[in-house]
Image (spheres, grey):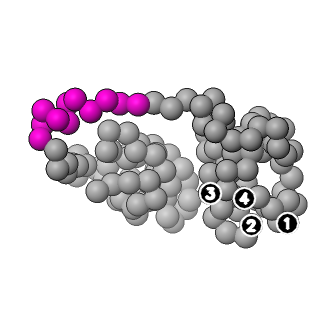
Amino acid sequence: MLKVGGEVDSWCTKCEMNLAHTIHAVVDHKPVKVECNTCHAVHKFRPPPGSKPVKTVSNRPAAARSMVEKKTISFEQLLQARDLASATRYSPKSVYKVDQVIEHPTFGLGFVSAVRDAQKIEVTFRTDVKVLVQGR
């Protein structure tokens, strides 16, 4: 089963090769946004040329699958679940935690969606997920 954080083979336009990619976003059980594990470029999922489309397996019968309601959560709803009053101005010198709200001078309000390591964080903004430095 394909899920966010899992791996899938995809065509990397930067490396111009079929390589392993980490899945960043999944829609209808199909990867839509991936990150190349070699060059770390983030782009939309592109199946390797000449490959079969990605198939998903579901335990539900076809009638039940068609009745599943698709739910979209807006960025505003994601922010409402966090404490906006404690939003801190982004600084590469500071250290951040998951779900911490950040105010970036260029990208605006966002929240830390993942801590990659001691010096990198992923921050989800309205338009994109950015990798920013921390603790420098």
Residue that appears at 74% across and 66% down: 119
Region rendered in magenta = 61-71
Name the one closer to the observer, 64 or 8: 64
Q: CA distance from mark 4 to mark 3?
A: 8 Å
Where 95 falls versus 73 (above or below)? below
Which residue is identified by label 3? 114
Q: Which mark is residue 97?
A: 4
At label 2, which amino acid type do we have?
Gln
- Tell me if label 4 and label 3 are in contact, CB under 8 Å: no
Q: Which mark is residue 119?
A: 2
In the visual, does 41 lie left or right of 99? left
Q: Between label 2 and label 3, give the one nearer the viewer.
A: 3
Q: Residues within 10 Å of mark 3 (few under 14, many from 20)?
A: some
Which residue is identified by label 1? 136
- Tell me if label 2 and label 1 are in contact, CB under 8 Å: yes
The first of marks 4 and 3 along the sequence is: 4
Q: Between label 4 and label 2, give the one nearer the viewer.
A: 4
Q: Is residue 75 magenta?
A: no
Where is residue 33 drawn, in percent x and y? 46, 45
At label 4, which amino acid type do we have?
Lys
The first of marks 2 and 3 along the sequence is: 3
At label 1, which amino acid type do we have?
Arg
The first of marks 2 and 1 along the sequence is: 2
Where is residue 57 drawn, in percent x and y? 19, 51
